[in-house]
Image: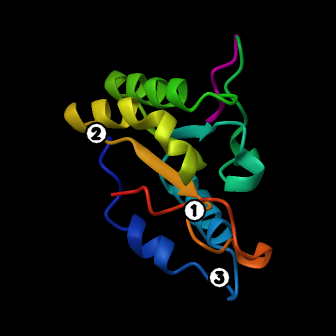
Amino acid sequence: MSLKLPVDLKEEIMDLEIEAPIATRKSAGAALAKAFEIVPYLVGGSADLAPSTKTYNGEYGEVQKGDYSGRNLRFGVREHAMGAVVNGISLHQGFRPFAATFLVFSDYMRPAIRLAALMKQPVIYVFTHDSIFVGEDGPTHQPVEHVE
């Protein structure tokens, strides 16, 4: 099974009509929704922040005990475990997984992110709330200066 992303995925996302001004997380959510539509093996979720990260796609249901037909995963507030789970899903080679959280919480995922990089796994990370401003909310406590 080939898990290469479709060559036209970038063009499809770039062709989305998104009206400015819009919060980055909303436009990223629209891009992810388009990716869900085009990439049938895309699965993932967030660390209990789906409403804020805009990464839940209700059209595709949730993976549940006894029902694995969904494509949305609920990890709860456990970024490190989420990173480990998407690594395992990627190693299975049947899915292209993504994990989403606020950028500041990526600190908890660093070991899992490092392992994904060392193993050359094509995991997608969606980090939001990554600026000195957060859209209409103004200044934020979410730092970016610790990212190198």
Q: Tell me which corner region of the image, top left, top right, bottom left or bottom right, holds residue 75.
A: top right
The residue pinned by badge 3 equals 18
Judged from the image, the secondary structure of the residue bearing numbered disc 1 is: helix
Q: Nearer the viewer, residue 125 or 136?
A: 136
Q: Amino acid at mark 3?
A: Ile
For this view, does 120 lie left or right of residue 142?
Answer: left
Q: Residue at x 70, y 80 (%)?
A: 22
Q: How is the image coloured?
A: rainbow
As drawn, is 102 to the left or to the right of 145?
A: right
Q: Residue 26, position in %: x, y? A: 68, 68
In the figure, 118 relative to 85: above or below?
below
Residue at the bottom extreme of this rendering:
20
Of the two numbered discs 1 and 3 in the rendering, the one whose residue sits closer to the viewer: 3
User: Which tag, 2 or 1, sits closer to the chain's start?
Assistant: 2
Which of the pair 100/91 is nearer the observer? 100
Residue type of the residue flagged with mark 1: Lys
Secondary structure of the residue carrying tag 2 is loop
70 within the magenta span: yes
What is the three-letter code of the residue carrying label 2?
Answer: Ser
Question: Disc 1 marks which residue?
Answer: 34
Q: Which residue is mark 2?
A: 2
C-alpha distance separating marks 2 and 3? 31 Å
Q: Is there a contact, CB below 8 Å, between mark 1 and mark 3?
A: no
Q: Which residues are magenta?
A: 66-74
Magenta region, main secondary structure: loop
Label 2, residues with CA under 10 Å away: few <14, some 14-19, many ≥20: few
Label 2 or label 3, whichever lies nearer to me, is 3
Q: Is residue 71 magenta?
A: yes
Q: What residue is drawn where x is 44% and y is 24%?
A: 84
Q: Secondary structure at mark 3?
A: loop
Q: Quadrant of the C terminus?
A: bottom left
